Amino acid sequence: MDSLATARFRRFARAVTAEVGALDTSFLGRGRPLGAARVLNAIGAGRAEVGEIRAYLGLDSGLMSRLLRGLEEEGLVTTAPHPADARRRVASLTEAGRREFEAYEALSDARAVALLERASHADDLLRAMDRVALVLGQEAIAIQETDPTSEPARACLAAYYAELAARFAGGFDVALSCDPEAVDMVRPRGAFLIAVADGVPVGCVGLTGRGGPVAEIKRLWVDPAARGLGVAKRLMQAAESAARDLGIRTLRLDTNSALSEAMALYRRSGWVEIDRFNDDPYPDHFFEKAL
């Protein structure tokens, strides 16, 4: 890598450090540094087990203990043995801690709004932020099974349909496609899986079954910012694993030649092209895989 690329990276790191207040002794003016504020935020956001918080924030055990002790001394956090395992500890916010968490949330939201209002191309800036966050946090992207009618699932599907409308020469109307029923994408018939990065959905895939040994893969989508990180491959592997759990022995899928990345993934993953098996007007390639 050339020296200019290194200089650009370091300039970016310095700008982010200054913007987020990483070196401030009083993050957002609340009297404590960023590390303590992040621990408080993690607990307020629902992470209770101390080991989970430490892993989420990438802290060593010594620093985690010091930060927790400081928050306890302020009367913002309490810790107690885990009810199922006394060797583990759980943390919770006090009433004062809840008020402090909410204050941080309001200030952080206001800072985000102010930054985006300064940008002449806020959408471009957000897309760049998405890409950086996902590349840096790719190891923490999790695959989760969810209800296909849940809000994260609907958000993924809406983005998927919008992308098809933009990429297909004649557009895309979900009402004209063979859209799977939600009931066919929940166990025991099928499953719906999403990829989640720090609480934000960045991909999805549906396993559509009808109780027999054959099922279909539907609606594979990955956020453009997360592409190239292996998310689609992981989603497909999770869908295949779910299919095996359900006793499904053969998977099928259809796709459109405009989705060249998807077709390449299927061929690399052992899928074999077969004849058309439905009357959906949009796909022009059909695949099958024996499990």
Image (cartoon, helix red, strand yellow):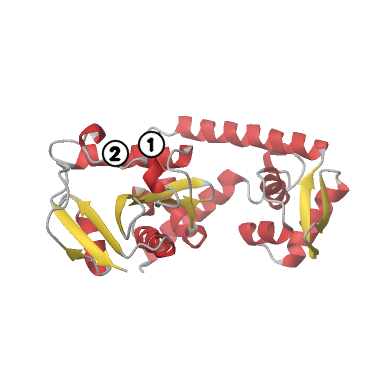
In-front residue for pair 144/28: 144
Mark 1 burial class by Cα count in 10 Å: few <14, some 14-19, many 20+: few
In terms of image quadrants, where is residue 6? bottom left
Q: Provide residue 268's location: percent of width, then percent of height.
A: 25, 68
In terms of image quadrants, where is residue 246? bottom left
Compared to residue 61, the image places residue 183 above or below, namely: above
238 on left or right of 101:
left
Mark 1, residue position = 123
SS under mark 2? helix
Question: Please, what is the three-letter code of the amino acid marked with disc 1?
Answer: Asp
Upstream in sequence: badge 1 or badge 2: 1
- Which quadrant of the figure contains the C terminus? bottom left
Mark 2, residue position = 161
In-front residue for pair 157/288: 288
Q: Residue at x 25, y 58 (%)?
A: 252
Q: How far apart in space, not on screen, are marks 1 and 2 (Cα)?
A: 20 Å
